[in-house]
Amino acid sequence: MSGSRAGSEVKVGSRQRLQMKVNEYKENQNITCVSLRPVQTTVLGKTPKVYLVPFSLSNYKPGQFKPSKSLLDKDFNNEVACKKCKKTEIRKTCKRILTPRMEGTSSKAESTLQKSSLDVYTESNKRQYNSTSDTVIVSVDMESSHDLDSDEDTTPGLDEFSGLSPYERKRLKNISENANFFASLQLSESAARLREMIKKRQPPESKRKKPKKKENGTGCRRSMRLLKVDPSGVSLPAPPAQPTVIADENPLLPPGPLEMTPENQDDDSELFKRFLQTWAEVSKTSIKNTEKELVNIKSYKANLSGMVINGDTVHKVTRGAIFSVALHPSEIRTLVAAGAKSGQVGLWDLTHQSKEDGVYVFQPHTQPVSCLYFSPANPAHILSLSYDGTLRCGDFSRAVFEEVYRDERSSFSSFDFMGEDASNLIVGHWNGNISLVDRRTPGTSYEKLINSSSSKIRTVHVHPVHRQYFITAGLRDIHIYDTRYLNPRKSQPLISLTEHTKSIASAYFSPLTGNRVVTTCADCKLRIFDSSCISSEIPLLTTIRHNTITGRWLTRFQAVWDPKQEDCVIVGSMAHPRRVEIFHESGQQVHSFFGGESLVSVCSINTMHPTRYILAGGNSSGKVHVFMN
């Protein structure tokens, strides 16, 4: 009794659950399920379409899927063994009922789906955030033999349909999954379309509109004179076009002699007349040409220690950097000449009480004056050479600058006297040429032009004893030539000094015997060579380490010999405090001139008086510093 009662209760429970499920199906009779098996796929614009085969459950009846009574009456324990038979029977029943209906409605559903997809695409472009009114639940027939053979469905969320058969539960699972899939797909497509629409609807960058000019508006009053209009309203004729003249930065002075007119003083003043008279009288003083002997180095140091500088011996003589300095050989007066970068030549008489009254500045050139010497034959003459291609002689007795040599197509760098009478000159050019000039011949041209083996010539210096020899300093080579064997086409040097590794600034013979040569190089070295025997080689005696890097704004250093002591050289220094140094040919430092507050700049160009202990140095601002006893 108890077993039959329990079996009846199970049957009643299963029927109730089945009846509840059928009622739920009746409530959702309008739901349409579409199989996800594509028949044809096309692309419309950028929106893909999928044509599916639909079927309807509107005519579904609960008894169609009901198992046979014989299977339900069996014992509950044998239900598991009969599951395969139930599944096979349910599949055949569904196929027999649904296949005719699917075939009858396939064509109609396909056309309806195409139209609905087009409507959805059109409406989605019009509405940004509104979803479609109808929801299509698509079912995908994804079951396989493996799915049908599974003993238990473990899908979460369908436990309330545990009374249904596995087939029915599988169908409901697919319906829910596909509904979620197509809903998310539709949302992603709508979001993509929305982003495209937002990009298309972004307004272009607005540019500021320029206000329109009022043509008929009343404007501000303008001067008729500035408009070049006659008061009567008639426009004035255009002025004739004047040719534009391009002024040369450094125009050459006219050829011929120039009057010695000071730029800083009145040429009619009594001071200038007395200044010229003083120079003429000093030049008449004879210079004793006695044999000079080297002074003992100890007494020489003692004499150098007595040389001092003060505020009265420092003065600005020229405008711009000083490129050359010369001391007059007078024994009674101290007269200093300085050549500047601006082309000026300044003369300073230190014996005058007032510094301003003793300085006179002249303009015989238009470019830097790189070489300046007093004539050894007539100290009243001062010869100056400039980059502008002119060589002039200032005669203080006649107050005129005579033109000795002129070449407008070339630029001069240095010159020297080939004899004691100062009538023959040798001139070096920046392009490497060498000119021989005779002052006794009329005209301002050269006697002979020689093409040297150097690309450039910075300095040229004649041997003090054997006047046929002269030395030139080029870029990185130093050559010694013999004037007796010069070839106008291409002259080969007798000796070449190749120990230098960088640019060379100068090269000079020793002043008394010419047995030594001192060179200044940009490799921070002063070199002294033995030139006592001019043969195939000149040996290097000493190398002195010295800072010669002056930079762009300072005049380059040039080491020169002391005319009184030919074994000592004078050179400027970059060390602090500022100084001027003297070195012996052995490399030892002999003396350093310090000036304290009177010497606060670099004296790049220095020279020594031939007989007196007077040192004059020029800096790059036009000042001259004089050390004297």
Image (cartoon, grey):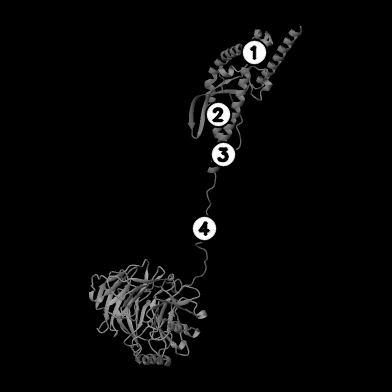
* Left or right, residue 509 beside residue 150: left
Residue 179 occupies which quadrant of the picture?
top right
Residue placed farthest to the right in the image?
A: 1
Q: Nearer the viewer, mark 2 or mark 1?
A: 1
Q: Name the kind of residue labelled 3 in the image.
A: Leu
Query: What's the CA distance linking mark 1 and mark 3?
Result: 53 Å
Checking the image for residue 116, the label placed there is 2
Query: What's the CA distance linking mark 4 and mark 1?
Result: 89 Å
Residue 616 picture location, percent across and down: 43, 82
Q: Earlier in the sequence, mark 4 or mark 2?
A: 2
Q: What residue did someone put label 4 on? A: 210
Along the line of sight, which residue is nearer the eye, 392 or 509? Answer: 509
Q: What residue did someone put label 1 on? A: 80
Residue 274 picture location, percent across and down: 41, 92
204 is higher (above) or lower (below) than 401: above
Q: Nearer the viewer, mark 2 or mark 3?
A: 3
Q: Earlier in the sequence, mark 2 or mark 1?
A: 1
Badge 4: how crowded within 10 Å, few (<14), some, or many (20+)?
few
Residue drawn where x is 47% and y is 84% of the image: 306
Residue 562 occupies which quadrant of the picture?
bottom left
